[in-house]
Amino acid sequence: MGEFMSYTRFAVYYLPPRGALADFGAEWLGWDARRGQAVAQPDLPGLGDITVTAAKYGFHGTLKPPFRLAPGCSRADLEQATARLADSTAPASSGGLVVAPLGRFMALVPQGDTAGIARVAATCVAQLDAFRAPLEDDEMARRRKAGLSPAQEALLVRWGYPYVMEAFRFHLTLTGRLPRTQIDMWSEVIASRLPPLPDAFVLDRIALMGERPDGRFEMIHAFALSG
């Protein structure tokens, strides 16, 4: 995917394997990040409005947040480093996914012990950090508008994002920020449309993603975790 595309940022995501859940996510958001293609959304009043922000990233779980490539680093170097990381990193699993609000947005979140998932994410953040360009002052200021805690501020300064490492919580985003009065309604709508979900969530592949000039992310390459 995107062999000749010029990307503005990169990221490492979990993308659900091809199947009912991946199809649901692509249709719900109107964007298939694996194929880099738009998908027709269900005819639900307001769906386009509540997914407009999430749609450009596709249906995914963030492992290493989007970053600009550091000077002197190439996309080929990043791909090779991601492949090496996958070769040396063991898969992870947890209890099954459930629909839940995270603050004011809806997501699928894993249940039970998620330490293995956090391990994979921390590995991606740390081992690929040399490829991340430092944040510009305006980027730092935008992140700080969220009212960060001292610990989150330290993570922002060190890793370029305030919700990594000990502040990380894996989730597959389904909406943008919702009015409080709509959270229960959209939770019910999502639950009614989800395909059957397995009892266990398995994270055994990671995907290197690229942000296209139009602002949408698409998969560059997927790598099996085989450490």
Image (cartoon, helix red, strand yellow):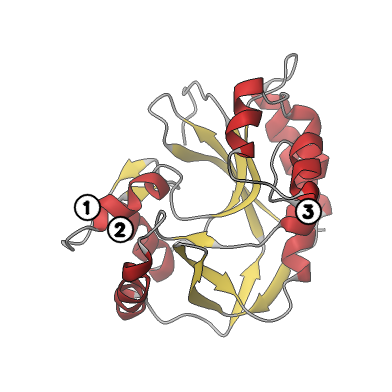
Q: Which residue is mark 3?
A: 165
Q: Which residue is mark 2?
A: 27
Which residue lies most toward the top here?
72
Q: Residue at x 36, y 78 (%)?
A: 191
* In this rendering, position of residue 14 left or right of residue 45: right
Q: Quadrant of residue 53?
A: top left
Which is more N-terminal, label 2 or label 1? 2
Residue 88, image x and y in percent? 84, 52
Number of numbered discs on residues: 3
Q: Amino acid at mark 3?
A: Met
Marks 3 and 2, how far apart at CA = 31 Å
Q: Amino acid at mark 1?
A: Ala
Q: Residue at x 75, y 28 (%)?
A: 131
Secondary structure of the residue carrying tag 3 is: helix
Asked if disc 1 and disc 2 are in contact, CB closer than 8 Å, the reply is: yes
Q: Quadrant of residue 190?
A: bottom left
Which is more N-terminal, label 1 or label 3? 1
Marks 1 and 2, how far apart at CA = 6 Å
Q: Quadrant of residue 72?
A: top right
Q: Residue at x 25, y 58 (%)?
A: 47
Residue 79, image x and y in percent? 68, 34
Which is more N-terminal, label 2 or label 3? 2
Secondary structure of the residue carrying tag 2 is: helix
Residue 226 seen by the camera: no
Res 40 label: 1
Location of residue 130 with respect to 161 vertically, above or below: above
Q: Residues within 10 Å of mark 3 (few under 14, many from 20)?
A: some
* In this rendering, position of residue 196 left or right of residue 136: left
Taking depth in this image into account, of 58 and 208 the one nearest to the observer is 58
Secondary structure of the residue carrying tag 1 is: loop
Q: Amino acid at mark 2?
A: Glu
Location of residue 174 with respect to 75 vertically, above or below: below
